[in-house]
Image (cartoon, rainbow, N blue to C red):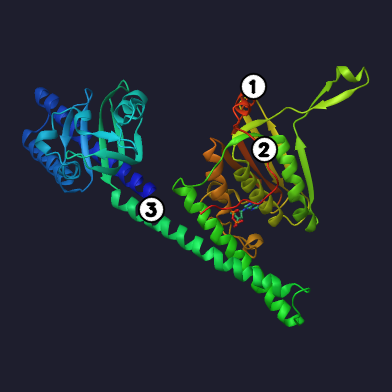
Amino acid sequence: MPINDRTIALGAGIAVVAAVVLGVLAWRLRRAAGGSKRGSVSSGNLASSLHDEQLRSSIILNTIEDGVVLIDSQQVIRLFNPGASHMTGWSVEDATGLSWPAVFKFVNSKGEPISTADDPVLKLFSTKDAVRNSAANLLTKSEKTITVSLVLSPILDEQKQVTGGVAVFRDVSEELKAEQQRAEFISTASHEMRTPVAAIEGYLALALNDKVSTIDSRARDYLEKAHASTQHLGKLFQDLLTSAKAEDGRLTSHPEVVEIGAFLEQLTGDLKFAAEKKGLGVDFTLGATRTIDASAGNSGNKVIRPLYYAYADPERLREVITNLFDNAVKYTDEGKVTIGLTGNDQVVQFFVRDTGFGIPAEDIPHMFQKFYRVDNSATRTIGGTGLGLFISRKIIELYGGRIWVESELGKGSTFYINLPRLSTQRAEELKGRGETTILRPTTSLTQTP
Ligand code: ADP
């Protein structure tokens, strides 16, 4: 599990424990107060069980390293444990009784105070739901910035009104730094290794070229295998580099206005040979509207195709569609691959459909995770890195879009992409400002270091 998920899960767990402990304590106190009036509770037992309860709560709160803070409906800090004190630099005595914003100053990546819309406590009171942030930048009392993973859970009364909140947080600065270093290492190593691998691949290709080299059939067999493995290695390094960049937001992107219909049509033309080589058909379907063309007289029926504009880097989109298309070909033995386009006022939707192996239902939720590969007899022998779909998701999310798959085992799969649609007017405006080229020549994506 990635660090962020782990910390969130841990934080959520502790929040629940703390909320339960505090809730039980408050309930017992209330019950004790009511009970003693009615005189129905044995005062000796009550005192000892209350004492036990309080002791347990205070042991937990004083021992755990995570910060635990209880605020009331006025955002006043009612409880501030030593863990919170250790991280923020505020003493328990000083922080208790102060308002939440006086102690918890969150800043953005530029060190500026976060906007009110991002304020976790305001969010808590407005949404009445737990607020989670796996990497919030918090200023300590001495104005040092630390990154914390924070879970803020609401305390609700019987009318479901928020009467306060419990915050549980932990310092993840070191973990983030270590993760960043790991990503940088992968990025540098893949980049450095790509160059010699490309050279090896080039020389192997020369050795296999009849016009340049003379080799016997056994040597050809060996070199072909070496060539295929080198190509696989080159792709792995390239994918590792791209995914490392996608994760830390360094993926280069030059978005522009793209008319997805023309874009897909051209791309299908470029890609179809790979499918045809394997004996698969290739279809391109486009949402078309048949209208009467006045200038062509009564008999003239003309197909007017709606224009589907989106704002994205065409080279990145090409990378995504190529990956989906390559997968469709790779995981299909017979039938066809269809690229299609539809949409409505808000959304441009395109898809890559195949008639191949399909994907087991239990694998579908994991398909866009890093290194995830379906492990069954049909796919086991087919090479791959398990990074293509992860990279595709990151790219599509970069443009505010969504990617998902629907599939039936043994029948085939359809990978869908939704991108926000630009109205023709908006597209024209952006084009007018020079923020466009409709199509670029067909080149494969070149990685920038
Ligand atoms: P790779 O294909 O390099 O392994 P991807 O991230 O592109 O990596 O795909 C992840 C996994 O998803 C693949 O290993 C394969 O098991 C499965 N998969 C992807 N596309 C398809 C498809 N069109 N049909 C069946 N399975 C697919």
- Residue 345 is left or right of residue 218, and the answer is left
The type of residue carrying mark 2 is Phe
Give the structural element (helix, strand or loop) at label 3.
helix
Are circles 2 and 3 on residues that touch, CB within 8 Å?
A: no
Q: Report, in whole angstroms, how far the alpha carbon at label 2 lies from the one at label 3.
A: 34 Å
Residues packed near mark 2 inside 10 Å, few (<14), some (14 to 19) or many (20 plus): many
Whether disc 3's CB lies below 8 Å from ligand 1 is answered no
Whether disc 2's CB lies below 8 Å from ligand 1 is answered no
- Residue at 73%, 50% (x, y): give it: 271
Q: Which mark is residue 156?
A: none
- Residue 111 is left or right of residue 283, and the answer is left
Task: State which tag comes first along the sequence, 2 or 3.
Answer: 3
- Residue at 71%, 52% (x, y): give it: 356
The type of residue carrying mark 1 is Gln
Give the structural element (helix, strand or loop) at label 2.
strand
Q: Report, in whole angstroms, how far the alpha carbon at label 1 lies from the one at label 3.
A: 42 Å
Instruction: Locate residue 204: give its quadrant.
Output: bottom right
Task: State which tag comes first along the sequence, 1 or 3.
Answer: 3
Task: State which tag comes first along the sequence, 2 or 1.
Answer: 2
**Eye-nearest disc, 2 or 3:** 3
The type of residue carrying mark 3 is Gln
Residues packed near mark 3 inside 10 Å, few (<14), some (14 to 19) or many (20 plus): some
Residue under numbered circle 1: 425
- Residue at 75%, 72% (x, y): give it: 209
- Is 163 situated above or below 402? above
- Residue 324 is left or right of residue 57, and the answer is right
Q: Which mark is residue 350?
A: 2
Q: Position of residue 127 (x, y in %)?
A: 37, 26
**Eye-nearest disc, 1 or 3:** 1
Give the structural element (helix, strand or loop) at label 1.
helix
- Residue 381 is left or right of residue 295, and the answer is left
Q: Which mark is residue 180?
A: 3
